[in-house]
């Protein structure tokens, strides 16, 4: 009951929520993430990403996340063949402590969600400070951000990214790992005028991490086709 109340009070009172969550589980730091779909236009709406989500013209995907302790987060989406899903470039960002929100991808990068899509696996990795994978991920992800890049080079980089993700996720005894599940609540619409706040924490999923144990959440999409 305490956690439910915390989630309902999150919007507008993030520090209160952070304190309650930390009191509920003071043993391990945790990271939280919510994927959302944003429709374009003056009356744009933002809603939680569902596993059976259908691509829509002009829409894009965003990740909202935070953490109780300082860490780095790596987000990447790959097809079953190990290619970049939907052309989405991976993202690596530092995450402040005290549940301060971070949104990815960072401009000018966008994750468009407007055409036919193959099934993919999206990885969200909360990496503790000092993690040996951070430097490698920083160089690789940085090299993949160039707007114009040879497709063969990008494919090679995607393969290295797949290998990096594989090394981390295959060390079962050294990570906390869980699948991302379907949001329990419905979507929330954005209005016009003053920028509203999407209450993403109501739909977020959390994972614990530690100094020697990254936290990994994996979303396996069902694939979707464009609306007729």
Image (spheres, rainbow, N blue to C red):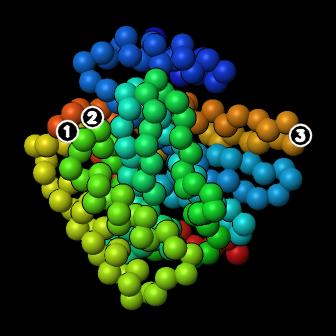
**Residue at the spot x=78%, y=51% of the render?**
44
Indicate the secondary structure of the residue bearing disc 1: loop
In the image, 83: left or right of 49? left
Contact check, label 1 and label 3, Cβ < 8 Å: no
Q: Give the residue displayed 21% in from the left and 33% down from the top.
A: 211
Figure check: 69 above or below 58: above
Tell me where residue 108 appears, x and y as whole percent: 63, 62
Image coordinates of residue 124 in percent, x first then y, are: 38, 50
Write down the residue under mark 1: 213
Does 85 sit left or right of 161 as displayed?
right
* Observer able to see residue 181: no
Crowding around mark 1 (Cα neighbors within 10 Å: few <14, some 14 to 19, many 20+) is: many
Residue position for label 2 = 209
Q: Which mark is residue 201?
A: none
Report if the CB atoms under discs 1 and 2 are less than 8 Å apart.
Answer: yes
Label 3 packing within 10 angstroms: few (<14), some (14-19), many (20+):
few
- Please tell me whether residue 144 is drawn above or below residue 218 in the rendered image: below
Could you tell me how far apart the alpha carbons at marks 1 and 3 are, in whole angstroms?
Answer: 44 Å
According to the image, label 3 marks what residue?
Answer: 193
Q: Secondary structure at mark 3?
A: loop
Secondary structure under badge 2? loop
Cα distance in 3D space between marks 3 and 2: 39 Å
In the rendered view, does 118 fall on the left or right side of 53?
A: left
Residue at image location 72% in from the left, 66% down from the top: 58
Q: Quadrant of residue 168?
A: bottom left
């Amino acid at each position: 009951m305490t956690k439910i109340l915390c989630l309902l009070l999150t919007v507008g009172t993030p520090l209160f929520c952070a304190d309650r969550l930390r009191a509920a589980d003071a043993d391990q730091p945790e990271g939280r993430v919510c994927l959302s779909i944003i429709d374009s236009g003056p009356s744009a709406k933002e809603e939680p990403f569902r596993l059976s989500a259908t691509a829509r013209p002009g829409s894009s995907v965003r990740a909202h996340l935070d953490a109780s302790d300082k860490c780095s987060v790596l987000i990447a989406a790959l097809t079953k063949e190990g290619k970049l899903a939907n052309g989405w470039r991976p993202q690596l960002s530092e995450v402040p402590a005290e549940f301060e929100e971070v949104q990815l991808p960072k401009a000018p990068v966008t994750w468009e969600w407007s055409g036919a899509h193959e099934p993919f696996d999206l990885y969200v990795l909360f990496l503790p400070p000092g993690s040996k994978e951070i430097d490698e991920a920083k160089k690789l992800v940085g090299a993949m951000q160039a707007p114009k890049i040879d497709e063969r080079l990008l494919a090679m980089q995607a393969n290295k990214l797949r290998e990096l993700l594989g090394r981390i996720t295959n060390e079962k005894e050294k990570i906390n790992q869980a699948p991302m599940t379907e949001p329990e609540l419905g979507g929330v619409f954005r209005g016009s005028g003053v920028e509203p706040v999407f209450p993403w924490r109501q739909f977020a999923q959390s994972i614990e991490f530690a100094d020697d144990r990254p936290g990994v959440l994996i979303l396996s999409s069902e694939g979707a086709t464009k609306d007729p």
